[in-house]
Amino acid sequence: MSGANIGDAQTVDLSPKLLSITKSDTTLYNPPLTGIVITTTAGDVKVLSGGNVITIPEACLTVGVPFPGSFSRIYSTDTTAVGILGWQR
């Protein structure tokens, strides 16, 4: 009889990986960030999302509140928020 024993099961870590973000006009995140959170000072955040450059306005970002999305880059230029964390799955 063939098959895997219960003891052979592998554990898969699905918890997000939290990263301290250094704003950069050149750094690409691969895999993309699946969200950001501002920890210090709210402000605008310019991102690359799905191939489009967009600016998330300060009014949409509250310190300490996660903002989900898919972000490949967090730009230095035009980003005024301070203390950005991002997470990946």
Image (cartoon, rainbow, N blue to C red):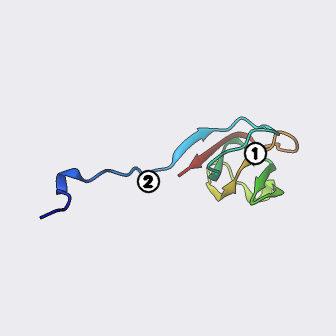
- The kind of residue tagged 1 is Ile
Which label's residue is closer to the chain start, 1 or 2? 2
Disc assigned to residue 7: none
- The residue positioned 22% from the left and 51% from the top of the image is 8
Q: Is residue 1 above or below residue 83?
A: below
- The kind of residue tagged 2 is Leu
In the rendered image, residue 40, in percent from the top left (x then y), is placed at: 68, 39
In the rendered image, residue 11, in percent from the top left (x then y), is placed at: 32, 50
In the picture of the structure, the residue carrying the numbered disc 2 is 14
Locate residue 89 relative to residue 30 in the image: left or right.
Answer: left
- The residue positioned 78% from the left and 53% from the top of the image is 48
In the rendered image, residue 14, in percent from the top left (x then y), is placed at: 43, 53
In the picture of the structure, the residue carrying the numbered disc 1 is 74
Q: Quadrant of residue 18?
A: top right
> Residue pushed farthest bottom?
1
Q: Secondary structure at mark 1?
A: strand
In the rendered image, residue 47, in percent from the top left (x then y), is placed at: 78, 51
Q: Secondary structure at mark 2?
A: loop
Please state the total of marks drawn on the protein image. Answer: 2
Q: Dot 2 surroundings within 10 Å: few (below 14), some, or many (20 or more)? A: few
- The residue positioned 88% from the left and 44% from the top of the image is 78
The quadrant of the picture occupied by the N terminus is bottom left
Q: Is residue 68 above or below residue 21?
A: below
- Along the line of sight, the residue nearer the viewer: 76 or 43: 76
Q: Quadrant of residue 20?
A: top right
> Residue pushed farthest left?
1
Q: Dot 1 surroundings within 10 Å: few (below 14), some, or many (20 or more)? A: many
